[in-house]
Image: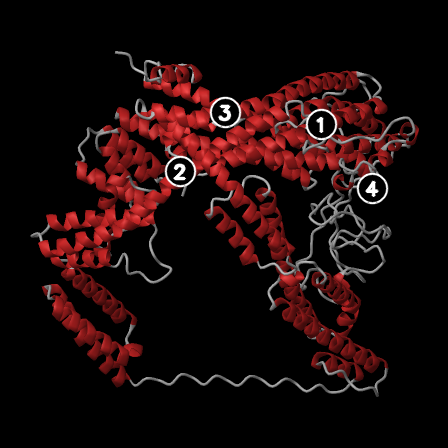
Amino acid sequence: MTSNSSKPHDLQALDSLTGGAFTAPTSGERASRIRDWLASNPAPEQMQEVFKELSGRDKGAARLLREKLDELKRAKGQEAIAAEWAQKAEGLLGQSKLNIADALAWQRDAAKAGAPLSREPLAGLKARLAERIKGIEDLQHRAQVHREAAVLLAQRFEVLSTKGWKDAQVAEESLRTDVTHWQQQAADIAADANWTSLDAKFAPQLEASKAQLLVVSDAFHSALAQAIAAAADAAAPLPPVPVWADELRAARGEAVAPKAAAPARPPAPKVDPAVRAAAQEAVQAALAKLEQETAEGHGKASAGAAAALRAVLKEHGKLVEAPLEARVHAALVAAGELEGWQRWSADKVREDLVAKAEGLLKRPEGQALGGRKMQETLRTLRDQWKQADQGGVPNHALWKRFDEACNEAHKVVEAWLEKVRADAAEHRALRVALIEEVKAWAAEHAGATDLKAHNRALHQFADRWRDAGHVGEKVFAELQPQWNEAFGAARAPFETAQKASIERRQAMIAEATELGAQPVLRIDAVKALQQRWQAEAQGVPLDRRQEQKLWDAFRAPIDEAFNRKSAEREKASAAMSERDRHVLNASKALDAANASGDAQKIRAAIAQLEAALRGEVPPPAPAPQRAASGDGPAVGATEVAGPDQAAAEFGESAEQAPSPNDAEASPAAVPAHESAAAPDLVAPADGADASARADSAAHDAGEAAAAEPPAPAAPPKPAPRPVVAVRGDDRPGNRKSEPAAPAARGGGRFGDRRGPGGPGGPGRPGGDRGGPRPDGRGDRGDRGAPGGRFGDYPPREDRGPRLGDTAFRAQREALERADMALRKLAAQAHGEALTQVLGAWEQRDAARLPSVQELGRAVTPAVRSSWSQAIGASPAARADEAAEALLRLEMAAEVPTPAEQLEARRALQLKLLTKRGDPAPAQTWGQDAGKVLAAAHDATSARRLQNALKALLRK
């Protein structure tokens, strides 16, 4: 009998179509062959036929086909959804007045509807809406800030009206300029395209601020003009400002009426002693009754006595003395605790749990619990019910109500779990689509030339993968290798270009080394090499740290060559002062002490450096070494001048040197004989250290100064003589013998260092508070008040001439390194001492216990002696005493306690509350540590003791 069925032939065809999926021996191989077949993008009809045949044989392998078919169905539906939401977004963007709430609702509703927001055109529309929203919010913030600026301007007018009219006249022009600038900014805000999209309240508020500011400004200028006229003409009327009017009356010689004194405060009425005694007796009687009821444990009676005591306090509370008041509060607290413990019975606990379970679905609108919070709450309530059943007889009626309420509330959890599963499926589909998108993008941009854009796109893909939503661990383990393969293929061209760029940069580093080793530095070759480096850095981006490391290696030989030029220039000009030499030598000595790792040597070197900064001459060295040239300064007495020193020789600070990122600033720093033949200096790109350009410009500018004859050495500073009487300006720092040197303003920028060598220090013309000003006037001390904003600064001492830039930077960097070394040594000593304590405890060897000096000031000799005795003796402490001591140590150190010991810690805290006279754990932590050390050693206790002592030994 012959069968007419063609199914075996169909299975054979499907097996060959799928690469042997039907004949594979295991389920894993079938799934793998189905996955490979799906990677070839077969037709939906073929997938449907394979799924129909495979679903009855292997559901695991068929699930891959079902997911792919579902994905295709969703993709067809998403096209229509994308068109619909794109039209809505275009409508929102076309509105002249955009509501922020509508724009945010578009994104939320589109995501709920399943629109593919990560694909075009919705991705572009989403970005445009976000940009529009950001512009509206920024404009709103600007309007609010502008309102505050108007208030501050009005306050400036008010403050000037409380000062002299001459001070107001000085500040009038700046105020007028500020008001005009404010009006211009307000007009710009109102002219913004997003102004119509703001809330209707902002326009009236801005107009009101403008009107108020103009009224205050007009009134101020009018009153000031009237004050100026009254000062010029005694018959003119006085201004309406009281302070200015009194000042003008005093100038005219008229009598000024004194201000009325504030009325004296009446003394507090005295309390009759008999009334106070009666109040004390009433409060004491009520207090005794409450203490008696509380001691006997009468819950209801204690509540009544507490209410009676509160009623007495309302009447006589103001007449109660402090000791009695403290007793009253303690008794009320104890009564409240007793009343609380009386309520805790088994049925009361069950009734409370039933009420909580029934109230889960009866919460106010807007306060409903979410799925995860509801699941956790139900689990907690059921655990509490189990605990209540262990302490009393079961109550079946209450249990039935409780179980029904929990089951009803669990429906919210079930709905939430369904939503979580749906979201996980959607997130998986998004990740699969992203992998395919990365593969397509990699094939399209295999030969890309714009590597920066390529790198940005890779970062965007990585961010989208990270933000693609949560999926299960099994799904993530399946998708992550596919993503790594696709992303690695997309990143391969970029990594190849990076390797080639690193090789080219290494070659340029070798060229820079050769240029720096030449006896004569070629500025044109340096510029050309820097231009090539900049072009390479702009073309191929690298990792920030790697790029910085390569840049440092590239600039090091060139900087070294410039440093050699600076050293030669310094030797020729001999411009370094004796004080700079002392500071440099002390800085080098401090660096040597830092390298030794000895804290005492470091502190001694810091003291020597501070003495050198104060101008104290160190004792001469027994046998100074001379330089090899024979006529140079002693070894260590000079320092290679950096680019900032070269800039300082031309009257600029290091911060005013040409910016390395400014392509037009560098030619001005190149000497005239080299600027014609060499192109502009070029800066490194993409965040690399850009100081080489400023260094080269400043160093070459310094060559012109090296050709000038050396300046004569400054004469030694004479010893100060006591001043008996001085006429004129006797401010500290004013040098009578030196005429005021006029100089241009702008010795520095806001934030530059002060003191010797800073823009605000004695080195800047007019910078010292005690020195003359560039315009020939004295400082604020000429007006009869000491320097300072409010006239409360003490006179500043004369700190001598400014330090050179090299000396200043050397001492600042040496002090910073010394501070870091001292901190590191202190932390290292603290950790070693703590390790030795734990080792001594483990070995029961008191000889290994650190000394008092090593343990620090927190451990006294008595405490150290008790620790030594505890470690030297055999373990004798009880386990409960050691456990309680550990808890006290953790409370004193304020460190966390292990989870299994939290209940014990709370119990100990309640115990300590009842013993108010006992010392706190922070006062007895040394004895508590001794109890722990007297017990047997174990790893858990050692770890807890280490965490506690780590914090306590630092106090």
Label 4 vs 1, first from the N-terminus = 1
Provide the secondary structure element on which disc 4 rests.
Answer: loop
Residue 109 visible (yes or no): yes
Q: Are marks 4 and 3 in contact (CB under 8 Å)?
A: no
Provide the secondary structure element on which disc 3 rests.
Answer: loop
Can you say which quadrant of the picture contains the C terminus?
A: top left
Q: Left or right? Give the position of 112 relative to 251.
A: left
Residue 646 in which image quadrant: top right
Q: Left or right? Give the position of 608 relative to 336.
A: right
Q: Position of residue 275 (x, y in %)?
A: 26, 85
Provide the secondary structure element on which disc 2 rests.
Answer: helix
Q: Are marks 3 and 2 in contact (CB under 8 Å)?
A: no
Residue found farthest to the left: 393
Residue hosting label 1: 539
Mark closer to the observer (4, 2): 2
Q: Are marks 4 and 1 in contact (CB under 8 Å)?
A: no
- The circle on residue 226 is none
Mark closer to the observer (4, 1): 1
How is colour applied across the structure in the image?
A: secondary structure
Residue hosting label 4: 651
- Kind of residue indicated by mark 1: Gly
